[in-house]
Amino acid sequence: MFDNVCVRDWMICPVVSITPDTSLAAARRALKDNVVRRLPVIADGKLVGIITSGDIREASPSDATTLSIWEVNYLWGQLTVQGVMTGHVVTVHPETSILDAAELMLEHKVSGLPVIDGEGYVVGILTESDIFRMLVRSRVRVSAGGL
Amino acid sequence: MNVSDIMTAKPAIIHPYNTLRKALKTMEEIGCHHLPVVSSEKHLVGILSDLDCRTALHSPFILHEGWQDEELLDRVTVGSIMTAAPIVVEPNAAADEVARLMLTHQIHCLPVMLGETLIGIVTASDLLAAFVRLSQRERYHNMVDKL
């Protein structure tokens, strides 16, 4: 049933991206405004990393910080996407099968894969949620031998 | 395929009065990212993710002394950083119901409850792995049919 389904069929495009020199505060706003949990980081048109809402939450000052609000704001303001993003990114091609993409997610323990075309440009993003949307849509049950 | 087919049965648990240090140690030992939080009366009261734990610690990108994290590890309790009253699922629910719940509520882990008893947890990775197994089986059968 899913053998002929490829990444292009379920990826999100166009994709919202960000540049490495963006402040973390702006990145957090971009995630919130676009209701997404990860942003590909792009420089000169090419993918250089990925940043997730988890990365930003982890980099944020703890609620239990002993620093003053002035210190926190100053230090937070110095941080950019480049310093926090994951630089080595696992990617897929639009024509990759959805099964191969899911295997890649499991193998590399990631929940999102930027989709790169033959010329190296980011054309979309595929996440676990997109695969789950596909499963929900297909509504296959036990009796049919599926999920 | 039902929740009981893909869940992790008898998951490790943590108590709300346990420390952040204990929670992180348990997650590291087991290699998991989520722990159901169970009260002394054996009631499920919450769920704790590794991101909840990391968020509670000081930002690794903001200058601080090592002892400050040490202090937090022993002072912060699981009950103060967990997600209380989590959404749960029954073991006989269809796997695609898990996908629907995860999509609707933007969550990655669901405790599996048989009545009042916690019998397992099911994560986004479990669901993705089930999808991969199913699709691999289907791909194999398609290949055999063609022979």
Image (cartoon, rainbow, N blue to C red):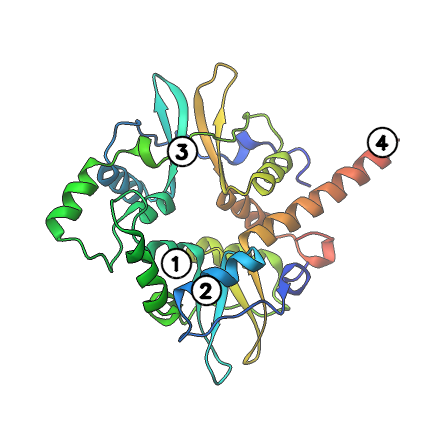
Q: Nearer the viewer, mark 1 or mark 4?
A: 1
**Crowd band around label 4 with a 10 angstrom C-alpha radius: few (<14), some (14–19), many (20+):** few
Q: Are marks 2 and 4 in contact (CB under 8 Å)?
A: no
**Crowd band around label 1 with a 10 angstrom C-alpha radius: few (<14), some (14–19), many (20+):** many
Q: Nearer the viewer, mark 3 or mark 1?
A: 1
Q: Toward which corner of the image does residue A121 lie, by quadrant?
A: top left
Q: Nearer the viewer, residue B39 or B58?
A: B58
Which residue is at a point 39% across and 39% down the rendered structure image?
A38
Kindly indicate whether the residues beneath marks 1 and 2 are on one polypeptide chain. Answer: yes
Q: Nearer the viewer, mark 2 or mark 3?
A: 2
Chain for disc number 3 = A
Give me the C-alpha separation between circle 2 and circle 4. Answer: 51 Å
Q: For this view, does A78 lie left or right of residue B107?
A: left
Q: Secondary structure at mark 2?
A: helix
Which residue is at a point 34% across and 59% down the rendered structure image?
B70
Q: Residue furthest top?
A: A119
| Whether residue B31 is situated above or below residue A38 in the rendered picture | below
Residue B24 coordinates in the image, percent (x, y): 46, 60
Chain for disc number 2 = B
Rendered-image quadrant of the N terminus of chain B: bottom right
Residue A67 coordinates in the image, percent (x, y): 17, 53
Q: Amino acid at mark 4?
A: Lys
Label 2, on which residue? B23
Q: Are marks 1 and 2 in contact (CB under 8 Å)?
A: yes
Label 3, on which residue? A50
Q: Amino acid at mark 3?
A: Ile
* Among the two numbered marks 1 and 4 on one chain, the one whose residue lies closer to the N terminus: 1
Label 1, on which residue? B53
Kindly indicate whether the residues beneath marks 2 and 3 are on one polypeptide chain. Answer: no
Label 4, on which residue? B146
Kindly indicate whether the residues beneath marks 3 and 1 are on one polypeptide chain. Answer: no
Q: Secondary structure at mark 1?
A: helix
